[in-house]
């Protein structure tokens, strides 16, 4: 089963936006066993998109578009699809009535042009949008499947997960062929060191590749295998994954879409524990990340971002002597911060992070990227020191992930 | 002058890599006045790449490829170009001798297969690679220009800057047309309402387009103009920008790459003011965003993430009566949080945000997305209420941007 992906948006032609939707979709389609043959990006031009769409439908059985479904005049995906299908655009009554409600509710904030989003090619079906107002479009054309989703990544991703993926699986049925992919999400070792340790494994097999990717302070090792059947692919993937874990298992915290903050949240919830964080160099990122998980208010009580020594002393109870003797970026300070925030907010666990995010503030003994993290609980307090590379944001992200991972290990009794 | 960009690599088809090369090149070409009409990505398949290349040369005057120039068997860009040009691959003596030197020098590390990189289509010229071993390829075909560069971003970028850019400029010569682009970054009004207010402006001019984009809780209006000369384009852009600002100027906080947190930081720094934030539903995101700016430790003293009513009362001094009468998501609570954190951390400005990020917790009067933000300073405290759409993360981002914008306006004396 062959697919092509089309991204629509003049911002792509101007280089103002990197097309992340296509790689998201390519990965998802591949893991379903659908082979992506071509990815095309075009601007917001009706004639051009119509042409591209026709060409793709001529080559592939599945064509997936993202972008151009919004309410503004430069959103031309609906028209292009209607052109290709040779049908008019008609208003979908149910969607239109929902949009009218929204327009009435957010008077002034949402304009009447939003109604354009209720237009659908006559022969197409809407795909519900779980997080936004523009529905997707599902159409069939001469035995080919055409799916259009919004360009906003969060909307596209949740629409794909909730509605499109199942639709594709239904249609694939028994014809499902066999690509299997596994991501091993790692924290605590750099990308080159991780890949060097596993580089020979892929060579042992035909049709196995191991790629790597740096993503939000984590390193992702991606194992891709191909086989004749799903069972063979699954078996092969398990073999390779076992080999990889033998080498670097201690750095693997989760697989595929298992976010570290979700794993930590689940552990806290299961154990009925509460947490508070004292953040210095991460500036709130750790707590922001923890609270991205729905329901996190049941275990996150709160945090203190202590960006100055004053605040570390006054709120967290870090001793003046600690700051003058060891400095704010020290094991001693990290420990006092973790214990301090645990006491201040009355939680089971207190976590802390203090370091130098740069670009200035480094010294020969404590260069930019030096970070201390600590976790305090009833058993005491543990602390780790890292020296991270990267720019200011990269160091914040790595420090955040390292702290979340230390919390995870502490909860599992392995730190 | 029209161009197309082709990215080559099976990792793109598997979604293992995001194609950043294309957006880099699209931006560079646009700024030279070359219009990018299509961006295509294909896997490492000779037949397919040959076909794509032929099609692109049929539509555009300039075709730029990246990827597939390395020494391994799946590097097929050279062959595809030779196919299209109808010429054989021949060894380039000078490049081959340099490669032989490298192979001898790094014995064991570089294999003999590296010599493949000395092969060039007979009628093509090599483009020097300033940072790697694979040269690029420059060829002409029926009056069209074809350029191939390596896929490694650092190699591609330095090859473009040092050699390709100048070549393009020479060829453009007097035919140089000019594209000018301006992004107006907006907060506080939805995408559809913003674009409706300016939709007629582009129609008044030939060669002017106004697009829009939702990006991290902001709406970006993108003005693109084309003209014969750079000066004309600049003048035209200024005219259009003035018209747009007349309509929606109150929502515009910055242009192009001006981040809101940088603007707020600059204002605080200039005025020698310090700030503290009390965050509820944003969970630390506001402070994380503020502290992404290098040097922010000179004005950010810290923050309290008060995720429970306990913490709001105990640390921020929100009155129990306020919570029981109005609830934690209320103007009264937001005001007490802002004043409380200002007092607690002894800053000039205290800011706060409290709301319902969802997906649960909404009520008919206060649905998911209801957010109160407040800014307290020596003049008193101001508060705003919003109802944001989107998922949990989207609501956090919109609330964060709304608060940063209210701080900006307060500092400028316009709120």
Image (tube, coloured by chain):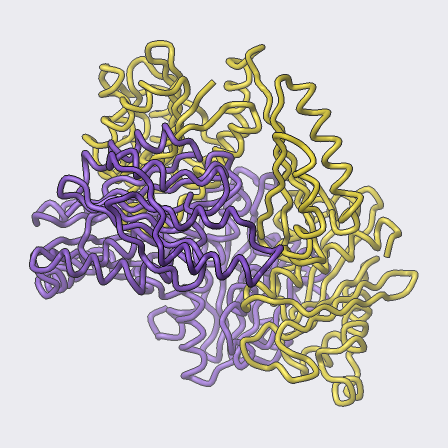
Chain colours: A yellow, B purple
Is residue B3 toward the left or the right of residue B370 in the image? Answer: left
Q: Is residue A371 left or right of residue A134?
A: right
Return the x and y of residue A357 as percentages of the image width and height.
Answer: 60, 72
Q: Residue at x 51, y 34 (%)?
A: B14
Q: Quadrant of residue A188?
A: bottom right
Residue A94: give x, y in percent of width and height. 38, 20
Q: What is the x, y in percent for residue A104? A: 34, 36
Residue at figure coordinates x 81%, y 67% from the top left:
A383
- Residue B172 drawn above or below residue B7: below
Whether residue A177 can be seen here: yes
Of A142 and B147, nearer the camera is B147
Report the residue that reaches farthest toward the right. Answer: A379
| Residue A41 can be seen, yes or no | no
Camera-nearest residue between B134 and A376: B134
> Which residue is found at the position 44% from the left and 46% from the top?
B116
Residue found 46% across the figure and 85% down from its top: B272
Closest to the observer, B273 or B229: B229
């Amino acid at each position: 089963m062959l697919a092509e992906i089309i991204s629509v948006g003049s911002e792509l032609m101007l280089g103002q936006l990197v097309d992340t939707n296509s790689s998201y979709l390519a990965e998802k389609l591949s893991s379903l066993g659908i082979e992506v043959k071509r990815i095309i990006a075009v601007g917001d031009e009706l004639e051009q998109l119509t042409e591209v769409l026709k060409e793709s439908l001529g080559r592939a059985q599945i064509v997936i578009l993202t972008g151009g479904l919004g309410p503004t005049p430069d959103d031309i995906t609906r028209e292009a699809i209607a052109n290709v299908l040779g049908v008019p655009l008609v208003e979908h009554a149910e969607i239109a009535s929902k949009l009218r409600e929204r327009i009435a509710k957010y008077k002034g904030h949402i304009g009447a042009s939003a109604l354009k989003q209720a237009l659908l090619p006559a022969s197409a079906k809407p795909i519900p949008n779980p997080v936004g107002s523009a529905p997707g479009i599902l159409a069939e054309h001469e035995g080919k499947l055409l799916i259009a989703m919004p360009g906003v990544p969060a909307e596209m991703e949740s629409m794909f997960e909730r509605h499109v993926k199942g639709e594709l699986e239904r249609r694939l049925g028994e014809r499902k062929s066999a690509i299997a992919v596994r991501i091993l999400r790692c924290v605590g070792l750099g990308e080159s060191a991780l890949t060097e340790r596993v580089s020979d494994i892929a060579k042992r097999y035909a049709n196995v590749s191991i790629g790597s990717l740096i993503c939000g302070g984590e390193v992702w090792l991606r194992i891709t295998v191909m086989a004749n059947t799903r069972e063979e692919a699954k078996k092969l993937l398990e073999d390779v994954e076992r080999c990889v874990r033998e080498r670097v298992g201690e750095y693997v915290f989760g697989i595929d879409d298992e976010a570290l903050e979700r794993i930590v949240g689940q552990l806290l919830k299961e154990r009925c524990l509460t947490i508070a964080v004292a953040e210095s160099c991460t500036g709130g990122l750790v707590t922001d990340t923890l609270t991205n998980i729905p329901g996190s208010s049941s275990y996150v009580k709160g945090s203190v971002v202590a960006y100055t020594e004053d605040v570390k002393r006054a709120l967290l109870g870090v001793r003046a002597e600690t700051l003058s003797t060891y400095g704010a970026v020290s094991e001693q300070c990290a420990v006092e911060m973790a214990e301090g925030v645990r006491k201040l907010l009355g939680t089971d666990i207190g976590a802390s992070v203090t370091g130098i995010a740069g670009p200035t503030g480094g010294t020969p003994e404590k260069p930019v990227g030096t970070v201390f993290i600590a976790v305090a609980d009833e058993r005491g307090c543990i602390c780790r020191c890292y020296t991270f590379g990267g720019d200011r944001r990269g160091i914040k992200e790595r420090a955040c992930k390292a702290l979340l991972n230390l919390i995870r290990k502490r909860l599992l009794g392995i730190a």
